[in-house]
Image (tube, grey):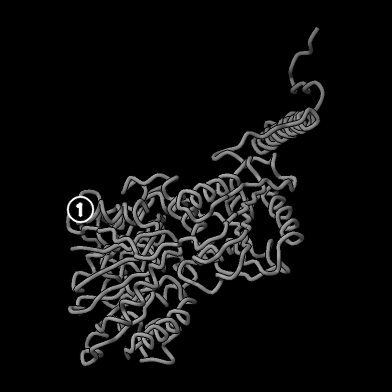
Amino acid sequence: MKIDVLTGRPGAGKTSEMIEEMTGVPGRYLFASPAIHLMPERVEKLREKAAEAGTSPVIREVHSKALLGGVGGNVRRQIAEAPDLHAGDEHVILLAMHEGTMNADLSAYAGWHARIDEVPNVLLSGAFRVPVTSGAMAALYDLEEVAEGWWRIAPREGTPDVSAFRQDDFLQDLAPFHRRARSAQGVFVNIGDWQDARARGVEVRWWSLWTPEEMAAFDTVAIAGSGFFGSVAHRAMERWCGDAVAFVPRPVGREVEHHGGHRRVVIRYFTGSHTGSTSFWTDTEDGRRCLHAVRGWLWENTPEGQFWSCNSALLPYLGGSMPGRHCQPKLAGTNRLDERTACTLVYSAKAQAQDETAMRLFGVSKEEVRASREDEDIKQFVMRGALRRAEFAGECHVNLYDRRQAEMLREYLLANGIADEAVVEYVEVGIGGIAKPAPGRQKIVVTPQQEAERRRRAKEADRARKRREREEERAAKAADGTLRGRGRPRKEDGAEARP
């Protein structure tokens, strides 16, 4: 099976090329997008390009927010049944989300063409402990051995749908697990009997991988993703599929080229002593102090014309009256910000504990996960601004959190000819000397005063312990009738007096 991968840096027109193909060449297309907020822009562009091409395709959205205006029913079922519904249409473009496409049965799409915008999140993994609820898991799922050390989850007949899991106070965290278990790709776990999960300390590890083999019925399949090759998704699919799937790079025809003028990008950062993470920023006093300092500078020094974003957990700390337009951090695919010359992204997307199973299975390092997520999101975010336009000449300003991010972006912009000049500037806001705690248990630093107080309390505790032991011994003797009063013992009757 061959998969065309449209390559090129952000702004090279990969999505536009797909749209022009779908509107200009009549046929039946399934167009999968990464984010639901992109749908209005996608539909508008499709209609615009169809009018230019003189075609009249049926354009239909199939996702959760389109149900009221379209054919009712389950999204997964709508996608699976679309080929029958549109069998009489010679030119149709069906817009769906990545998640809906990956969860649907696509076996009826013979004669169709699949077009996937941006690299989908094909790999999920995690772990959980169920020493008490293992019985409930056994009632929901059978286990079928598929490979040494791995069993496939098989939902039993009558198992509730994902919405029921989301409403369950105890099992709602397993909703992603259950959604994948009900999909064509399924879920694999490391235990063959749910009884084994009752043992103390046993952790059930699971993973699920979607591959393009699910799209074997399509006549052609193409993915538009500048960071596909070398991504975690590519690494996992290539290892799992082997020779069954060939990923063929297809450079797009349009690149961001200069049409005169000079492009200069100023990249600012706030610390070189540590990198950010949501747990550091929100769970530690130093992290919150860093956010407060960065926020103060941003609020005073960024223009109203900028666009900005951050991890959702940081909005209570950075939001409010931040100048500019707030966006989602994952901005792949939109063209509505390309007049703006300034942006801010306070963001982290590193490997999490739930990624450990997949990293072990597919030989992916934490650094590879971080680069595939964080670096690619930063590149996509910055390239949504004026740098996206080939005719732009002038200066852009980018604010990132740490030096590693700033230097990565500088190298990327220069290496790809996106900027003629890119400079990195450090902004002093008082957090340059703060270091993140090292992983694992932290050594506690104790002052002399704290040590003296600790010893005093230890002595008091020791005296109290000895006093309790004496009282307990006295109570036991009293109960046995062997308790002696104070002073010399009294002489028994008939006893001779001591001379």
In the rendered view of the protein, which quadrant contains the C terminus? top right
**x and y percent of residue 427 in the render?**
70, 48
Say which quarter of the image contains residue 23.
bottom left
Q: Residue at x 65, y 45 (%)?
A: 271
Q: Who is closer to the viewer here, 67 or 422?
A: 422
Expressed as whole percent of the image width and height from the top left, the position of residue 130 reads: 40, 58
Residue ID for mark 1: 242
Pick the front one: 243 or 418: 418
* Image position of 270 (left or right of 393): right
Q: Secondary structure at mark 1?
A: helix
Query: In which quadrant is the N terminus drawn?
Result: bottom left
Residue 139 shows in this picture: no
The residue shown at (64%, 51%) is 268
Question: Neighbour class for label 1 at 10 Å: few (<14), some, many (≥20)?
Answer: few
> What's the residue type where badge 1 is placed?
Gly
- The total number of labels drawn is 1
- Residue 235's place in the image compared with 11, above or below, is above
